[in-house]
Image (tube, rainbow, N blue to C red):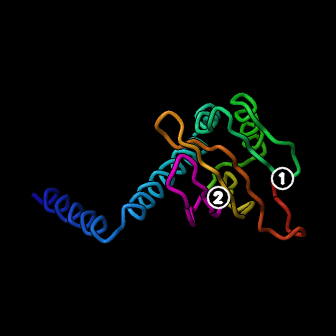
Amino acid sequence: MMLTKLKRLFMGFVLLVCIACTPDEYQQKIIFLEIVEAEKVFMDAFKQVDVIKLANLYAKDGQIFPANNEVVEGSHNIASFWQGLMGLGIASVKLKTVEVEGTGEIVHEVGRYTIHAQDGEIIDFGKYLVIWKKEEGRWALYRHMWTTSMTQQAGLKI
């Protein structure tokens, strides 16, 4: 009974949001939510040390642009890259989507990240930019770049 009332309330809220939005705004909100969901999958895969799942989140022609490294492309190389980072003692990555813009087959996301060690200590934090590409009915990471916000003196504690 209570669940039914909650469902009705939620659906009423969604309807209000839809009525208040233009078609483009509505589409933008849907894409934002889809990107946030994809980021949750990314964080879960990282926490589970599932580099294959991480690599599969990227487009077939996806690329990573890590600082102080060459461009990483190809599913195998992307999986190896993430495996290497995990081997440095990174236990989890927390992502916070700040904005998502675009309504076509390509959108960009700006966000913030924190990287945690096994004991939960924050070992890095910064910002990221992802260009997402619609591929086979899902959003895939197409271009992925991030940079630390830590001072050079602090450095990574990995």
**Helix, strand or loop for the magenta stretch, by majority:** strand
Residue at 67% in and 51% down? 118
Q: What is the secondary structure assignment of the residue under circle 2?
A: loop
Q: Residues within 10 Å of mark 1 (few under 14, many from 20)?
A: few
* x and y percentages locating residue 107 in the rendered image: 57, 53
User: Which quarter of the rendered picture does the N terminus lie within?
Assistant: bottom left
- The answer to which quarter of the image holds residue 83 is top right
User: Magenta segment: does it hold 30?
Assistant: no
Q: Which residues are magenta?
A: 94-113
Q: Residues within 10 Å of mark 2 (few under 14, many from 20)?
A: few
Label 1 or label 2, whichever lies nearer to me, is 1
Residue at 46% in and 51% down? 34
Residue on which disc 1 sits: 67
**Vertical order, 153 against 35 (above or below):** below
C-alpha separation, residue under disc 1 versus residue under disc 2: 23 Å
Amino acid marked by disc 2? Gly
Amino acid marked by disc 1? Ala
Q: What is the secondary structure assignment of the residue under circle 1?
A: loop
Visible residue check, residue 143: yes
Visible residue check, residue 49: no
In the drawing, does residue 80 fall left or right of residue 46?
right
The numbered dot on residue 99 is none
In the drawing, does residue 130 fall left or right of residue 26?
right
Q: 102 or 61, which is in the foreground?
A: 102
- The answer to which quarter of the image holds residue 121 is bottom right
User: Magenta segment: does it hold 108?
Assistant: yes
